Image (cartoon, rainbow, N blue to C red):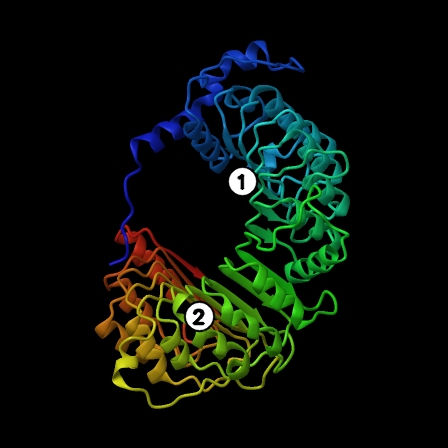
């Protein structure tokens, strides 16, 4: 049976009680005597001695119950706070006056998440980070963060180790220069994580960052490989130096990103990146051909591999993917193949013996039919493929493939630790296949099942799961021809009657 609902823990009950009665009791005096005062630099209230984690949980609880107001922040933002996440409270917290309260009352912050609070002015963000010199981790993704904010960071937050400014279009090379310690700023030399996805930073700005931030381990930028090669060329020409010293040839980067659609690329940049970044564990290449993948065979520490071909036959399995798997497949834990045909699942199971997450995604219109080669395999491989798999996603936009029922049943039977299963357009995933799987593998760890456009799936299959031994908390059924809204309502009623902690979604 799926997991049953549990009685709320005492701490949760208390927090909900505080949230429910906060205006009647806890903030009554404050609202009566101080609510109209424009500026309060220091407030000793009922939550002054709450721990950091309790304040965060109370904020999340109040946001969940839709009872969070501006006046509450005066009482909740206390000097004890060192870590705060306001990204889920964007409806209330995403205003300048709330951030000013935070600036005045919680100056000890070291970890702050303001992502998606795009109602806050850039000047307010700059004033905030200026008042928080102890910051170590800051998330300003999807905000009005600009070069001015990064300049303030470079001048005042010298202990910053993690920074994310995803989709901040006003961030450019000028901001990158400030972070890297040029433009008359000390810089953030301790940065180990920097995410610049969706900004206007160019390869020139990335070169400065890589040259000066020598501790950088995760650098999310559309063309890391190109930046590394440009830095190499400039060093050879004597253009770039690191405080007058010879630049270190080995970088500490753990990830490489390359989006081939952004500019003209060459294989040499990939080869140089592999040679200069021997500790890379994560690679994401988009819109490149087979010849760009050859150097990846030398990455002995590779754990996460994501390859995406945008055009038909741009990336091939036999000539591009398979050589990598044959060399370093044993170390790969997560594999994503997007827009690649002729994927041999048997060979992936043979080479990637430790694979925990597997994603296949092929958009509609790229191929008329998706081919999955099928051939006779020895019994040893049949019983050893995908034994450690925990998350499996297969999306076939066309819905037309030659994936065999027998092969799918074998892999699902082997995946005894599967927790997350998402299939779209997989017609061979039907009641007979899953019934055969459940006879040998009850999928005891399965928590999420999402099935879309699988037209041979019947209600009997879902009933089998609801009455079986598993850990299901979410079942989503989208455009499955044999399953109706009435069926889904019956599933949900059965779950509610048996007190299952399970939600059934139907679209």
Note whether 378 is above or below 163 in the view shown: below
Residue 403, percent from left and from top: 43, 84
Q: In the displayed structure, would residue 376 be above or below residue 82?
A: below
Q: Nearer the viewer, residue 202 or 118?
A: 202
Where on the picture, by quarter, is residue 385?
A: bottom left
How many residues crowd around disc 1 within 10 Å: few (fewer than 14), some, or many (20 or more)?
Answer: some
Residue 507 place in picture, x, y as percent: 49, 64
Residue 507 appears anywhere in the view: no
Q: Which residue is mark 2?
A: 328
> In this view, which residue lies farthest toward the top?
33
Q: Secondary structure at mark 2?
A: helix
231 left or right of 436 in image: right
Of the 4 image quadrants, the one containing the N terminus is bottom left
Near-viewer residue (427 or 492): 427
Q: How many neighbours does mark 2 have within 10 angstroms: few (below 14), some (14-19), or many (20 or more)?
A: some
Kind of element beneath mark 1: loop
- Taking the spot 61% from the left edge, 27% from the top edge, the residue there is 133
Point out which mark residue 88 bears: 1
- In the rendered image, the residue lying farthest to the bottom is 376
At 43% from the left edge and 23% from the top edge, which residue is drawn? 21
Circle nearer the N terminus (2, 1): 1
Q: Is residue 331 or residue 78 the one in the foreground? A: 331
Q: Residue furthest front?
A: 245
- Residue at image x 45%, y 61%? 301
């Amino acid at each position: 049976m799926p997991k049953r609902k549990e009685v709320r823990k005492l701490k949760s009950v208390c927090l909900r009680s505080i949230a429910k009665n906060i205006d009647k009791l806890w903030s009554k005096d404050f609202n009566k005597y101080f609510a109209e005062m424009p500026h309060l630099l220091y407030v000793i209230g009922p939550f002054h001695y709450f721990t950091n984690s309790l304040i965060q949980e109370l904020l999340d609880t109040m946001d969940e119950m839709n009872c969070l107001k501006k006046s509450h922040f005066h009482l909740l933002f206390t000097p004890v706070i060192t870590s705060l996440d306001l990204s889920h409270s964007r409806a209330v917290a995403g205003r300048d006056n709330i951030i000013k309260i935070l600036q005045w009352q919680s100056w000890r912050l070291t970890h702050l998440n303001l992502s998606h609070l795009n109602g806050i002015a850039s000047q307010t963000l700059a004033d905030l980070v200026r008042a928080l010199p102890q910051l170590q981790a800051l998330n300003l993704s999807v905000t009005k963060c600009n070069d001015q904010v990064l300049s303030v960071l470079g001048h005042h937050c010298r202990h910053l180790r993690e920074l994310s400014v995803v989709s901040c279009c006003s961030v450019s090379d000028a901001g990158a220069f400030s972070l890297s310690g040029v433009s008359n700023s000390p810089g953030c030399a301790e940065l180990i994580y920097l995410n610049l996805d969706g900004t206007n930073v160019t390869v020139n700005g990335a070169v400065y960052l890589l040259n000066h931030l020598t501790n950088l381990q995760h650098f999310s930028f559309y063309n890391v490989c190109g930046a590394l090669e440009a830095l190499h060329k400039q060093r050879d020409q004597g253009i770039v130096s690191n405080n007058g010293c010879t630049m270190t040839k080995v970088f500490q980067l753990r990830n490489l990103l390359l989006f081939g659609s952004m500019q003209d690329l060459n294989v040499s940049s990939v080869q140089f990146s592999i040679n200069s970044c021997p500790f890379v564990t994560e690679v994401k290449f988009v819109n490149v051909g087979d010849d760009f993948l050859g150097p990846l065979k030398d990455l002995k520490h590779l754990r996460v591999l994501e390859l995406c071909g945008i055009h038909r036959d741009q990336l091939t399995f036999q000539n591009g993917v398979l050589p990598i798997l044959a060399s370093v497949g044993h170390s790969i834990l997560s594999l994503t193949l997007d827009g690649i045909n002729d994927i041999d699942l048997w060979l992936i199971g043979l080479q990637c013996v430790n694979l925990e997450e597997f994603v296949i995604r092929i958009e509609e219109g790229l191929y008329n039919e998706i081919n999955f080669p099928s051939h006779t395999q020895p019994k040893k491989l049949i019983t050893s493929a995908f034994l450690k798999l925990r998350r499996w996603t297969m999306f076939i936009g066309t819905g037309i493939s030659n994936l065999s029922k027998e092969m799918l049943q074998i892999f699902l039977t082997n995946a005894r630790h599967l927790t997350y299963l998402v299939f779209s357009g997989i017609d061979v995933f039907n009641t007979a296949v899953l019934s055969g799987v459940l006879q040998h593998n009850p999928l005891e760890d399965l928590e999420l099942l999402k099935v879309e456009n699988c037209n041979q799936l019947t209600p009997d299959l879902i009933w089998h799961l609801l009455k079986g031994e598993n850990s299901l908390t979410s079942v989503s059924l989208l455009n499955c021809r044999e399953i109706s809204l009435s069926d889904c309502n019956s599933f949900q009623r059965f779950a509610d009657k048996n007190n299952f902690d399970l939600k059934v979604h139907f679209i």
